[in-house]
Amino acid sequence: LAKNDGFALDTDAILDVQVKRLHEYKRQLLCAMLITRLQMQIHADPNAEFTPRSFVFGAKAAAGYYTAKRIIELICSLAKDVNNDPLCKGKLQVCFMENYRVAAAEALMPAAQVSEQISTAGKEASGTGNMKLMLNGAVLSIEDSGSRFSKNVTVEGSVRGSRGDLYKTHVALDMDEH
């Protein structure tokens, strides 16, 4: 990141990585809302104990996908605001990689410690990117699409076949029991 994007990561912070294609219903927008909430928490109580977090986004959007491009603009604007906020210094960082590609993934995925693969149930298939993050040790928080995962994955949301009451209930699964 420092070499290609001029961004120096806080090596003491938890590295939270959001990479892959960007869609309006996917986790990048939800993560942007989380970052906003964290920044608001820091402002509400600047002296509170806070585990430093660095969020790195890397995604592309289809050429005609206006909403996805607006989300990228939102994240870039949020990054500028957070990174220039003196209260967030040493606590919160945000970076949107300018040119996310395979070479960047090869360096970023082994360094990732957390990656929320959050989406509307049934809208996102887990792919090789998720597996690469998990195999390199990142804790993944995902919506379960019916498959089984390793112990370093937190599964939240619905399970295939139980989506009828999805918006009325929340199910957290302990994968050791399944």
Image: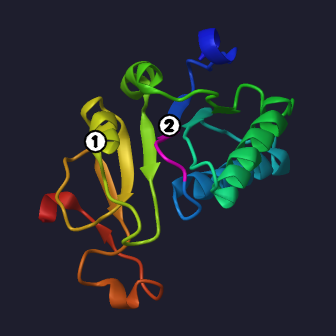
Q: Nearer the viewer, mark 1 or mark 2?
A: 1
* Mark 1 secondary-structure assignment: helix
- Residue at horizontal 67 percent and vertical 39 percent from the top: 49
Three-letter amino acid code at disc 1?
Answer: Thr
- Residue at horizontal 47 percent and vertical 22 percent from the top: 104
Q: Do the residues labelled 1 and 2 touch (CB within 8 Å)?
A: no
The residue at which mark 2 appears reads as 17
In the figure, residue 5 lies in which quadrant?
top right
Its colouring scheme is rainbow
Q: Residues within 10 Å of mark 1 (few under 14, many from 20)?
A: few
In the image, farthest residue toward the top? 3
Label drawn at residue 88:
none
Residue 126 lies, in percent from the top left, at 31, 53
Residue 80 lies, in percent from the top left, at 81, 34
Magenta span: 17-22
Label drawn at residue 128:
1
- Residue at horizontal 68 percent and vertical 50 percent from the top: 69
